[in-house]
Amino acid sequence: MHTKKTLTSTIILISLLPLTSHAFSAFSVDEYRQSLLNAYSEVFSGICEPDRMDFKAADAELKPGAVAIEADQTELIDKKIIFTGNAELERDGMMINADRLTYDKDGDRVAGQGDIRIQDPSGNVFQAQSMEIEVETLIGTADDVEYSLTSKIPGRKSDDSKDIRAHGVAKHIDFEGHDIVTLHDATYSTCRKDKEIAVLNAGKIELDKAAGVGKAKNMKLRLWDVPVFWFPYVSFPLTDDRKSGFLMPSIGATDRSGTVVKIPYYINISPNMDATLSGNYYSKRGAQLQGEYRYLTQQGKGNFNGAYLADDKETGENRYGYNLDLNQRFARRWSASVNYAEVSDENYFEDFSGNLLLTSTTYLRQEGRVEYAGSWLRANALYSQFQTIDEDIPEASRPYKREPAITFSTNIPKLDKFKFDLYGSYTDFQRTDRVSGPRSDLGASVMYDFRKIYGFFKPKATLRYTAYDLTNVVDGEVTDPDRSLGIFSLDSGLYFDKDSFIKGRDFTTTLEPRLFYLYVPYEDQTDIPIFDTGESTFSMGTMFRENRFTGPDRIGDTNQLTVALTSRLIDAEGGEDLLKGTLGQIYYFEDRQVSLSTDPAVPQTFNRSDFVGELYTRLNSKFYMYNFFQYDSEESEIGDFKTDLRYSKDARRGVNVGYYYNNNGSQQLNADVAWALAPRWQLNANARYDIEESDFLRSGLAIGYSACCWGVTVAAQRRIDNQSEYVNSFLLTFTLNGLTNIKTGF
């Protein structure tokens, strides 16, 4: 479950947008705002110290209900006791100080004049020029009041002061018992008194200490004493506990949906359960209802969010989207999960989502899963299907339904140095327009795991059986193909190391040759359909796998030897790799005939693969570099190449730069920057540049400023949408810290 800690309003400056047909899109908020807030939380922990207020502890010897009054002088006039000079009254933790107090014993009322200070049992303080209050019931009034609401911060041991959570002034106050105080013509601010930037002005503010919530009517938000927003009603918490109530509305605009106004309402259902409802209005499309429900238990968690807009003004259709995400453990070794998402149409995310990842979504997952995790056995059963968002994807390329997919694997303890594995799956692939049916796949292996300080030796033998029961096949084709294969591999390596002393530091240099032999006999597999199998991307990792394909519909035949050499430079003191380089190549002793085609294919006849190389560099804790390349020795050319350079000065300052090249000529540059310009200023920027097209695919810049009670973020971004059109966006976000504090979970 997530956490919300600020009351936020969004201001869009349409006049600052570039002169283009594409207007504002709000996706930049989700991408930048959280990173800014994370950075602020670290740096401001020691900067944003609140105002402090003197706190006088209650007299522990005073009996409940007893009244204690002291002053420099005391006078009795007509059944009233007049206390003058440092007068103080205390009862049940409430203390009243004034230049002059008049106590009516018969009415149990006290009136005060001149520099009055009222401290309630919680430590909240009200300073006034005149007041009258009934001591037992705490019903009364005060005029010309300055107040401070306090909170005890965990970890502070001082009993003579408290932190000021909020403060303000009021023309008049009504004390309505022990829990409720009503302020008239009042202000409310969570800023420090010497930096009162953001202030709420309200005709009436009710502070309910029992409920822990404040309610303001006819409220104006003033920034630097300039009115910015007006709201007829706003609620906010008085403690760190989450409370139900309206959150700050937001205002935005997009070229696809027009001006957007969102009014959210938070519902605190229980300590482990909450919800948010939002009424949204899109000027080009209409009114939308949006909601999110969250829960968290010791055995699981869940989240449901969705939105519905009836009769879209642009399309005339009902528009909706929802997602259900559940994870539940219902027994010691059993768990279940549901991840189900659906939208009404392919343009839903483009029209209504501000998330850049969602706007590029191709498929939506719709699945339910049950899992068992035992000491000897792991198994799961999955029901899965997908909603295709991109309607341009051909039907033949869309994924199958799995009704169901059952998998298992064993964890048999080693017998001396022998390791036994048994695994399998049963998957029923269903499509109405394509070859379908269940697939059973079983595998059993035995491996001898010999390891010493100088190297390792691991021969492995595997038996793999796969069978199908097909429907929707062309007349004359096999409906029940199967395949049995024996696989043999031998993985081995040696370790050589040497101690070195370089510039006053001790290092260990290693040389690690590795040989991986793999033999898979050929078997004709053209009668087997392709359900979920593809060709693996060639990399250092795939050179040591037993199958060059990603799924069981194809097992590649081969007789090959992978040769690799790794060298490391290790910090002898910390044991960390400062340099690690690996170079490898596969040598083929036979042609490879198996392909993804269901028709006989031309065999692969080349006798060696491209060279593959990786280089990791970590010169210190701040600098990291990764390089990868493929080199075709026969053509003497680079296949794929990429490099990433990362520099992290500290938690708030870092740079990442990357260059990518592949053998089709595509070249891209990526850059990401997160940098603290000053203790309260943060800059975030990113860019993706296509060298061949000489244009940016995406670029963004955000600058944020955070004070102790407020913050502002300015973000701009340019991206390409699903229609290959450029979208420019600009957003100004203002946050008020401490006015809402919503915590979910335990």
Image (cartoon, helix red, strand yellow):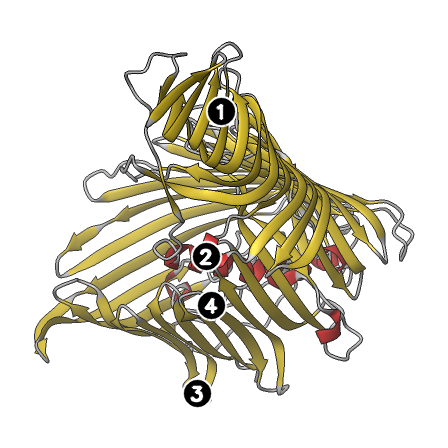
- How far apart, in angstroms, are the residues tagged by discs 4 and 1? 45 Å
Q: What element does badge 1 sit on?
A: loop
Q: Residue at x 92, y 52 (%)?
A: 316
Depth-wise, is mark 2 or mark 1 nearer the camera? Answer: 2
Amino acid type, label 1: Phe
If you read the primary sequence from the N terminus, does the residue marked by circle 4 or circle 1 appear first? 1
**For residue 450, side relative to residue 420 (left or right):** left
Tag 1 or tag 2, which sits nearer the N-term?
2
The image quadrant of residue 150 is top left
Q: Which mark is residue 682?
A: 4
The disc at residue 630 is: none
Numbered mark located on residue 330 in the image: 1
Q: Secondary structure at mark 3?
A: loop
The residue under label 3 is 634
- Whether residue 368 is visible, yes or no, is no
Location of residue 379 in the rendering, given as x and y in whole percent from the top left corner: 47, 34
